[in-house]
Amino acid sequence: MSLEMFFTLLGGLGLFIYGMRIMGEGLQKAAGDRLKKLLELLTENRILGVLMGTVVTAIIQSSSATTVMVVGFVNAGLMSLKQAAGVIMGANIGTTVTAQLIAFKLTDYALPSIGIGVALFLFCKKRSYRFIGQILLGFGMLFLGMDIMKHAMKPLAKMPEFTDFMASFSKNPFLGVIAGVALTSIVQSSSATIGILQALAASGLVNIYIALPILFGDNIGTCVTALISSIGTTVTAKRAAVIHLVFNVIGTVIFLILLPIVTPLVQMTSGDPVRQIANAHTIFNISNTIIQLPFSIFLVNLATKLVPGKDVIIERGVKYLDKRFLETPTIAFAQVTKELIRMGRLAEENLKDSIEIFLNFNEAKIKKVREKEEVINELEREITKFLADLSRTPLTNKQSKKITGLLNSANDIERVGDQAKNILELAEFREDHQLPFSEEAIKELTHMYHKVESTLKCALAAFEQDDKDKAREVLSHEDDIDKIEKNLRMHHINRLNKGLCYPSSGVIYLDIISILERVGDHSTNIAHMVLED
């Protein structure tokens, strides 16, 4: 292969992949957040999960993206492994749409599509028209890339080494599977590698006997993206990625055994080798889903055995609130207190984890902190909504006043969560810029944190137990925290004047002691609520 041919092929492949991505993004934007919401809500039934996986993948043009999304949902506790299995199977079916689209050979419409797409995208003010423009632009680039690849590969037909190499895949299907796995693992898109196969078929370099084993390998190779995305996630999320891999490996083994039956069956569907590859891709994924869907629970059990361990799952949504409690305000108030304490514990954990990440950077912990922050925000919204509903019921003056106090406490706890997130961001900034901190500065921050942490714990305990003595103890800590903050600020200025402190590190140092002082203030506010009750 000449250098010119190689770069032409590479450029065509780049256009193809980028076009597919642009088209998928346009379709996704046109659909909005409805795709994710549908995926979250409509996957309880296995068959419905398969349908949703198919539809979402057909729209976003990437089974890898859908599977990564599923891994994220499982990681966040929004989807069970059993639900994920159905969506993953559907994703494999949805990805066959690209190959079927290519088989229509719409290359003549590539350039007009790009022209119209660019015009709509650049000159239309309406968002929906711009999304349509992006879809057309991606569509045109996809087919233009396909055409470039097809022409780049034509000279390969005159190279006996290449034709003999490709022919070896029909003689030894396992080599074809390995080639498909390797190529898709590199390109990170089974649609792209199927597109390469179709371009080879259009150039007369590949027949269905050669293409089928490679196609099976492509389906295994596409699992690499989900496996990579599961690194650093929960054990359950890792299992979701493994289900994707096991599903495709089992399907490949079944179809390799049935290869003598499958090949003539695919040939009967069309006389065009390009269409045959598209049909084979569709037949493989639909049949594989039909075969394995009834046994999805066994896939889940197998993944559980392959990825042992237990997860600390963060429960999403409210745990103690129920609208039925609104009829009995006394019970409703007790349940709100429980939910607020749960929210407070999460904020307390996040504060602790954020400080630990700042002192000893840990990438794996960052995701967990961000997940908890999302849960804290969700709880604050739900508690506020519940209290608003409670305020519309017949209440005594004391109870009405208590609602105001609970709303303020919810806001204070949520702000503690925000302060933890701020420390996390400072930790990431420090790590990115490799900013040094002296041992003295670290000791000072640790000392202040421990004081603030004990104050927050005391405030939450006072709130939970309605303990006024503990609330007064929190108030006594407020002055101590303020004094510590002032002293640390003075120590820092002294170090700065003596040239012992790196200026950028100093800015972060001051930010953190200010953040910790604010956490102390929020703890004090919670204590005041207990004393006023």
Image (cartoon, helix red, strand yellow):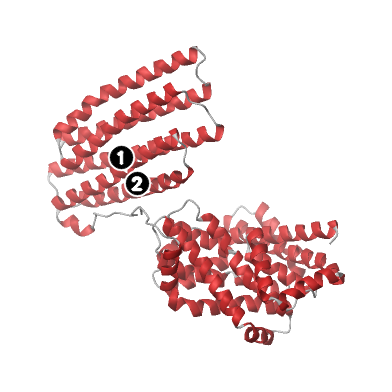
Q: Nearer the viewer, residue 298 or 26?
A: 298
Residue located beneath label 2 in the image: 376
Quarter that holds the N terminus: bottom right
Residue located beneath label 1 in the image: 413
Q: Position of residue 119 (x, y in %)?
A: 70, 56
The quarter of the displayed image where residue 311 is located? bottom left
Q: Nearer the viewer, residue 66 or 206?
A: 206
Q: Position of residue 335 (x, y in %)?
A: 20, 51
Local secondary structure at mark 2: helix
Residue at 29% over, 54% down: 318
Quarter that holds the C terminus: top left
Residue at 53% over, 59% down: 227
Local secondary structure at mark 1: helix
Is any atom of residue 101 visible in this view? Answer: no
Is any atom of residue 169 visible in this view? Answer: yes
Asked whether, in this view, residue 333 is left or right of residue 444, the answer is left
Q: Earlier in the sequence, mark 1 or mark 2?
A: 2
Residue at 86% over, 68% down: 155
Asked whether, in this view, residue 161 is left or right of residue 511, the answer is right
The quarter of the displayed image where residue 115 is located? bottom right
Q: Nearer the viewer, residue 32 or 440?
A: 440
Asked whether, in this view, residue 363 is left or right of residue 381, the answer is right
Q: Position of residue 15 (x, y in %)?
A: 72, 59
Q: How many marks?
A: 2
Indicate the amino acid at tag 1: Ile
Q: Are marks 1 and 2 in contact (CB under 8 Å)?
A: yes
Indicate the amino acid at tag 2: Ile
Q: Position of residue 486 (x, y in %)?
A: 35, 18
